[in-house]
Amino acid sequence: MKIIKRDGTTAEFDKKKIRLAMAKAFRSVNNPIDSEELDRMVLDIEKTIQERYPKEQIPSVEEIQDLVELTLIDHNYYQVVKSYILYRAKHSMDRKVIEEFGDYIKDPQIIDEIRKVQADFDRTRYSIEQLYYKFTSFAKEDMKEEEYLKALTKAASELTAKEAPDWEYVAGRFLNLSVRREIEGFWDGKGCDSFKDRIRYMEKEGLYGSFIPESYSDEEIDELEDYMKPHRDHLLNYSGMDLISKRYLISTHEGEVIERPQEMFMGIAMHLALPEKDKVHWAKRLYDIYSKLQVTVATPTMSNARKPFHQLSSCFIDTVPDSLDGIYRSIDNFAQVSKHGGGMGLYFGKVRATGSDIRGFKGVAGGVIRWIKIANDTAVAVDQLGVRQGSVAIYLDAWHRDLPEFLQLRTNNGDDRMKAHDVFPAICYPDLFWKMAKENINGSWYLFDPHEIMVKKGYCLEDSYGKEWEERYWDCVEDPEVSKRVIKMKDLVRIIIKSWVETGTPFTFNRDIVNRLNPNKHKGMIYSSNLCTEILQNMKEIETISTEIKDDNGDTIIVNTTKAGDFVVCNLASLVLDRIDLKDDKEVERIIETAVRGLDNVIDLNQYPVAYGEVTNQKYRSIGLGTSGYHHALVKEGIRWSDEEAHREFADKVYEKINYYTIKASMNIAKEKGSYSYFEGSDWQTGEYFDLRGYDSDKWQELKKEVSEKGLRNAYLMAIAPTGSTSIIAGTTAAVDPVMSRYFLEEKKGSILPRVAPGLSPETFWLYENAHDIDQGVVAEIAGIRQRHMDQSQSINIYITTEYTMRTLLNIYIRAWEAGVKTVYYVRSKSLEVAECDSCSS
């Protein structure tokens, strides 16, 4: 049998389409129908066509649909008939709208994309008629096809609303088509029809690393090209597609985008799979988790993997020594890190205070502020190829004598000559500080010069923690030979809170909690964190040993010998929680196993901006697996943030599971490739790591035993970064933060574009609570629950309103400390704009 289609062409009669349309009509009125009954009606229609139409007369689609209506009436399905008639009318209207689009747009590729949107999205909320009316408000008759495509993108984006959030994904499709056409236009006529051809071309242009074609055969690259899934581009919404096209897809030196999104994901996967014996197998696994947006990699990894210069790490931390050479070396290290897109944490707690002595001359030292100003100017000067200025957090101990001046670096009061507005100050607090803030706020707090303590007491106060630190602190307080600066605790707290409210800083580092739970305390101390407060690893200053003048074939050379110290580097990735079935342990394990494998390989593949980082990273092999999409995952479970009991249970179960499979993944790699250098004697090896966290179930005890026997590949495993950029790409909520707003307007290129919380619907609207409306004490408590399951830390923010008193804000921090929270990032006030750390995004 044949039928005449609406465009006049003839096609084979397909009764499956009739059956499908009838089934939809029954479903639309919630009228279940027996499958056999439906088949009988379709058979009746088929017989009627054969009886009514002779062979030479071919029925039209419209005539067959009329027969469907009559058949439904004959079987007394009157309500279904009504639905089917409306269904026909809607499709007729949609066809008419497509024709009206055709009055403007002649390009069949664009029209085809509109048809796909029509087919893939709910026609009730995402009507192409609505799209058409919005489109016509921007379109003009004399526009080019690309301008029409941009008008479509803008129309879809501006239709985004609380009631219809997926217009952002429709806009993403049109933007994707626009980018795809730009890419195809570049490659047209260049004879690069395959992935391997495009790789070779980009390599010759200095845009792609030669190590890819050198390591993979043509057949392997072809196999991986066949494995790519172009339809996964549809997982990107407008914001995500816009971001990767501008910042992550490979462009020519003139700025033309020439890499497709799926080629980007595959290129990253191929690079990170290079150390594996079965590279193709692991490239496929890595590609799957990246292209499905189940895992996002850090901004430097996403930008630089597959490229000739591949600095892949986000976070660096240096301990600034108390010497002129050491200070300038740390500033130089920061400059090198910043040059290649990394963020930096600098610990200044060892640098002598204002008024200290230098070579026995008393009262001549200028203190830490003048050196911090140099770090500030370096951040501005080394601006990462003009993309953005460098970013550095400066950490100082709560007992350092220059602390009051340090707290005024970014505030609006005080001497402008003492300001450093482009650094992010952070304070390292001992437990005693919070105990006094809670129990004895009218008491005195003592500030010291670290150099004087070292000279007079023979120890460095910053080199101890917990009980030992407290004993040494009181020893210094009671020693009349040690000079001290005395400040009332309440006055110091007032200065800190003023800075929190005014600038969002200083960040918080709870040093005693950090070091008690450091799994590698047998090899050192953790003095501070990084730019985004999530990295906690052993630190040690770089030390100059000697300077020698040598003769080298008649040339005089000067050789400086240094001890490498522990210059912290961390490699980041994030599990996108709302894109993973958290109840499916097999899926969670497989994704984590793959993500950890990729992170571990970064260590060997990385091109380090400073050699000290490479030495430390090879010793510890530290990684930072984090999460994003936390609030969205919570909402998908039907849990409100402020529902404490359900929220606690969710956080505890999810992060315990993630921790378990992360440790297991690292252990399995250790069995294959060996443990990190300092595994022996670590808390991992002795089992203290598991004991300190109360992991006493049979499952955990078995893993504890296995790790002790088989080793661990990575000294540090979990850290939750802010994920500012990469959560936009994944279309999810950032890190572990609550959403700032369910719905807001964003200004972009002169347009006001609506933005919505991911997965927003009438069912989830009230489950989403805006960050500033949430009890921040609950934020602190939940952070403590997550913290138990992390060997490093998490970038958490405190959200405040004008209703918060100084005491209220202080109590939140005390509550966080009591809950075992290791670090706190920004204080975010509704009236305060703060910079987001992008280099640590993961």
Image (cartoon, rainbow, N blue to C red):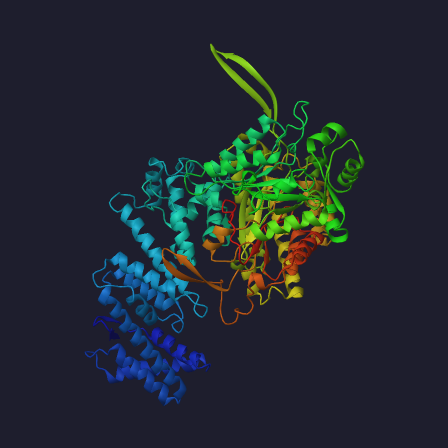
Please state if 546 lies on the left or on the right of 731 as rendered. right
Residue 124 drawn above or below residue 302: below
Number of numbered discs on residues: 0
Please state if 391 lies on the left or on the right of 404 as rendered. left
Task: Judge by depth and name the residue closer to the eye, 528 or 691.
Answer: 528
- Where residue 558 appears, x then y in whole percent? 52, 17
Q: Quadrant of the N terminus?
A: bottom left
Residue 134 drawn above or below residue 629: below
User: Furthest-top residue in view?
Assistant: 554
Task: Judge by depth and name the residue closer to the eye, 330 or 436.
Answer: 436
Task: Judge by depth and name the residue closer to the eye, 180 or 50.
Answer: 180
Residue 358 drawn above or below residue 478: above
Q: For residue 400, which quarter of the picture?
A: top right
Q: For residue 387, which quarter of the picture?
A: top left
Res 613 seen here: yes
- Where residue 373 appears, x then y in whole percent? 54, 36
Res 594 seen here: no
User: Furthest-left residue in view?
Assistant: 56
* Residue sitting at x 55%, y 54%: 735
* Residue sitting at x 38%, y 75%: 20
- Where residue 616 appears, x then y in whole percent? 59, 34
Please state if 18 lies on the left or on the right of 624 as rendered. left
Task: Judge by depth and name the residue closer to the eye, 435 or 40.
Answer: 435
